Amino acid sequence: MTEMLHQAHSKPHAAGVFRTGEGESMMQPFMDQALGDAVASRGGTGIAQSIERLLNGPQAASKSK
């Protein structure tokens, strides 16, 4: 989870008024770690069940008939 969050922040940041400073650049990995740990401790994002349902959808529907 942490790696996913880290990759989401690896893109270049905005310039001008919305640019980030050195402090944010230095602290972002710690925020990613804390957020990743919090999401993981609550069971993840819940996307696994959705993917499983989509992949097994036609099979599950035919088995239940």
Image: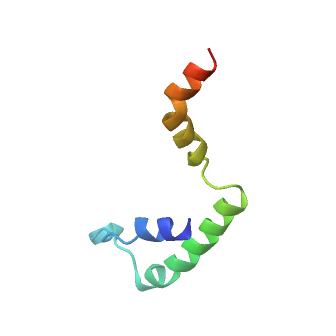
Colour basis? rainbow
Residue placed most toward the observer, 46 or 53:
53
Report the residue at 50% width, 26% height from top: 58
In the picture as drawn, the residue positioned furthest to the right comes out as: 41
Q: How many marks?
A: 0
Residue placed most toward the observer, 62 or 30:
62
Position above or below: 46 against 17: above
33 displayed left or right of 42: left
In the picture as drawn, the residue positioned furthest to the front comes out as: 63
Return the x and y of residue 64 as percentages of the image width and height. 64, 19
Report the residue at 44% width, 81% height from top: 25
Report the residue at 37% width, 72% height from top: 10
Q: Quadrant for the N terminus, please.
A: bottom right
Return the x and y of residue 31 as percentages of the image width and height. 57, 73
Image quadrant where residue 17 sits: bottom left
Return the x and y of residue 24 as percentages of the image width and height. 47, 79
32 displayed left or right of 22: right
In the picture as drawn, the residue positioned furthest to the left comes out as: 15
Residue placed most toward the observer, 47 or 59:
59
Report the residue at 42% width, 85% height from top: 22
Residue placed most toward the observer, 10 or 44:
44
17 displayed left or right of 65: left
Q: Quadrant for the C terminus, please.
A: top right
